[in-house]
Amino acid sequence: MALDNENLANLDLDGLRGEIDDIDQALQALIIRRTKVVQAVGAYKDRVIAAGGKVKVPYRPAREARIMRTLVERHDGAFPKTALIQIWREMIAAGTRLEAPYTVALCRNAEGQDCWELARLNFGCLNEIVEFETPREAYGALEDGRAAVGVFPKPEFGEPMPWWTLLTEQSAVRVVSKLPFGGCPVGRGEQTEGFVLAAIDLEDSGDDRTLFVVSLSKEISMDTVRKKIADGIDGSAILGFSDEMASDRRFVLVDVPGFFCNRADAFQATLAQQGLNPESLRVVGAYAVPISEDALS
């Protein structure tokens, strides 16, 4: 049984180490119990499949976001919150692997940058990471089921053939998470940001942002597009744009606050009121807002 702070102060070094050993044993017992519950979840899903039902990919980024936020909110003491989050990341990833092992697709951008550290931190040390030379190859692995999730570098302005232009109405693949969510890796990859793509349903985590791709005429300058979108949608940001060489269309990736996956028509009307008159507008994903550095300090 754990001692209170006053009694801890009365222990010698051997006594303190003994207390740590007792706590470690209790923690391990809880991990074993948690694993049995996870296995029961897997068995339940097997019964659903056997009965002819469908079970989703076990990756649930919105649920994970709620778990991580709760951990941070109730945490107290000197143990770093980022380390606490990483402990849970590994437990969730290991538990998910018990339900269904899955592969993580990874690709580089035009500058050769990848998100290896972010992928490993988010999906644990056990899940396989497969690197692809191009975003199109990584995206293809998601579409044909060779990979369950993909980690793609944050879009850069002016990059040729950005990966987000691959997100079409015909594909089930969407942006489902943004990384890092709860703290950056130290050293290599410290400044790296990325998005997770998967063919799963989008869920509201309680604090989210939604991604749209808007098709506009090239005759409208990007400065005008930025101003009118900012005026029409508070808190919005443009993450990238791409010109279609064979036509007069320009595609713009817009990031807006809130979970608005069923309101594409409303946003299209808003942009029309700003004089942009988009030819089309489609939802390409949504993600839980990452935990702020202030909350992690």
Image (cartoon, helix red, strand yellow):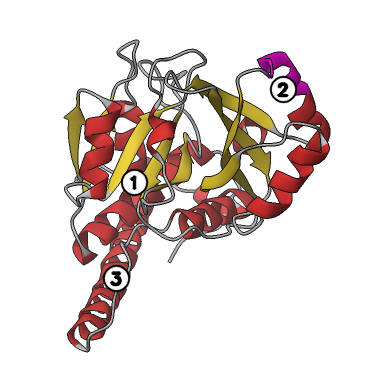
Residue 251 locus on image (x, y percent): 54, 28
Queried whether the magenta region covers residue 156, the answer comes back as: no
The amino acid type of the residue labelled 2 equals Arg
Q: Residue at x 29, y 21 (%)?
A: 108
The quarter in which the C terminus is drawn is: top right
Q: Secondary structure at mark 3?
A: helix
The amino acid type of the residue labelled 3 equals Val
Q: Residue at x 75, y 38 (%)?
A: 271
Residue highlighted by disc 1:
17
Per the model, the C-alpha gap separating discs 1 and 2 is 59 Å
Per the model, the C-alpha gap separating discs 2 and 3 is 46 Å
Front one among 282 and 44: 282
Give left or right: position of 140 versus 24.
Answer: left
Q: Which residues are magenta?
A: 220-227
Give left or right: position of 252 versus 115.
Answer: right
For residue 226, the mark is 2
Point out the tag, 1 or 3, that comes first from the N-terminus.
Answer: 1
Please identify the quarter of the rendering in which residue 56 is found: bottom left
Residue highlighted by disc 3:
38
Kindly indicate whether the residue at mark 3 contacts the one at mark 1 (C-beta within 8 angstroms). Answer: no
Mark 3 Cα shell of 10 Å, populated few (<14), some (14-19), many (≥20): some
Q: Secondary structure at mark 1?
A: helix
User: In the displayed structure, would residue 82 be above or below residue 133?
Assistant: below
Q: Residue at x 69, y 45 (%)?
A: 268
Point out the tag, 1 or 2, that comes first from the N-terminus.
Answer: 1
- From the image, state whether disc 1 or disc 3 is nearer to you: 3
Give left or right: position of 246 versus 48.
Answer: right
Please identify the quarter of the rendering in which residue 163 is found: top left
Front one among 263 and 205: 263
For residue 220, the mark is none
